[in-house]
Image (spheres, coloured by chain):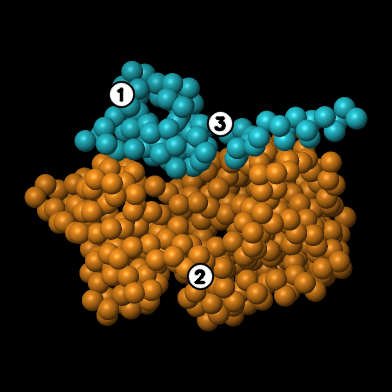
Amino acid sequence: MRQAELLIIGGGPAGLCAAISAAKSGAKVLIIERNKYLGGQLVKQTHMFFGSEKQYASTRGIDITEILLNELDKYKENVEILADTTVVGMYEDGIITALYKEDDFFKISAKAVVVATGAFEKSLAFPNNDLPGIYGAGAVQTLMNVHGVKPGNKVLMVGAGNIGLIVSYQLMQAGVEVVAILDAASKIGGYLVHASKIRRMGVPILTSYTVKEAIGKDFIEKAVICQVDDKFQPIEGTEKEFDVDVMCISVGLTPLNELLAMRGCQMKYVPQLSGFVPLRNENYETTIENIFAAGDTTGVEEASAAMVEGYLAGLCAAAKIGYKTDDFDERKNDFVKQLDALRSGPVGKHILSGIEQIVV
Amino acid sequence: MNENTIICRCSDVTLKQVRDLINDGYVTYDEIKRITRIGMGPCQGKTCGQLVMREIANMTGQNIKDIKFQTTRPPVVGVKLGLIAKEGKKDEE
């Protein structure tokens, strides 16, 4: 059995920052990352971030990964990284199991764990939603920006949140036509600066619309959409048809919580946080002692907040297992202030009303 | 039309099947899972989870907040039995 002081599950923005923070405090950290590379979803974010200076506003996501990895490298004597490895189980007796590629299955015992597994894309139910060519928008972004694969030629984007808007723009950058963006909500959910950029390029953004069906034999050939009323019910006679070979579903993310749930952490469905999330205290410790959680797995927000939550969780987890530095309070207060600043807008208020329901 | 709406991509479970079961009184995710294998494929319920819960909520007149979450168990991805046996043997040594 492999022994670890602090195990961090997930090497995205929250996990990397938790590792930096804990390693800086002196804890030995082991990061387990499912992908071959660290950075999580940051690596496919070719656009510049908003947020505040401390979370690298105006820097591209892919470059933020480099900054974080360089920072982590300062404490490399305290850091071990296992990439291409998936944590597959967390058991009541504290044992954690992991799988390296498909070849090696092993057990880990850790003094504390930070679960930073992020979120995954929600799906949408409509007829023929299993036709090839229908993707999650995040999946298309990975295909294009990580693997260099063009997903198709004509795309209908379902969802006008930030992911839908940004991926639409990046599709156009890659030379793909976006025929329209639609959203069931009556207002555009994403930042208007992204939406304006897309409108200037001539792409319609249709609010109060939903997908009625996809049509095609071996792959999607047509998408039919229709207007919805204020109760999100389809209005007959409002159908529009588009010839497309790709439909991107971008209807939100939901926390990836299965490890926390199977470990027995108390979970709660909180709409403002987009799904089931663990109850936790102000130190990001769940209802199971020494199991911490940070980032989107505790509520879908955005990468800037995930980073600060990671710093906080890493700091507190390290302190809990004996690495409480003299400047603990100072560091903690600084991170708390950063989070407050990030959450000072209307979206932040919404998130905070969700967080209120899970902090015990 | 619900027959062509896939709720569970792993096991090809349709919206019609899910709605029929809810009408028959199977009103928890875990019951529907035992009958249809929904949530037991490679994605382990990540794709269908919220869709099924929303159907249960709508059809039984409950708030989705009050619907019981699916039971999750290890492993979260497929692991070859041979690998588990090999690791288990280490405990005997």
Residue A82, can we see it? yes
The residue lying toward the viewer, choosing from A43 and A245, is A245
What residue is rendered at 47% in x and 68% in y? Answer: A148
Question: What x and y, as percent, mark residue A170?
Answer: 40, 72
Image: A33 above or below A326: above
C-alpha span from label 2 to label 1: 42 Å
Find chain B in the image and tell me its colour: cyan
Subunit ID for the residue under disc 1: B
Q: Which residue is mark 2?
A: A45
Q: Which residue is mark 1?
A: B20
What residue is rendered at 27% in x and 80% in y? Answer: A200
Image: A165 above or below A259: below
Q: Looking at the colours in the rendered structure, which chain would you say is drawn in orange?
A: A
Subunit ID for the residue under disc 3: B
Q: Which residue is mark 3?
A: B71
A154 vs A28, left or right, is left
The residue lying toward the viewer, choosing from B22 and B63, is B22
Mark 2 vs 1: CB contact within 8 A:
no
Q: Quadrant of residue A333?
A: bottom right
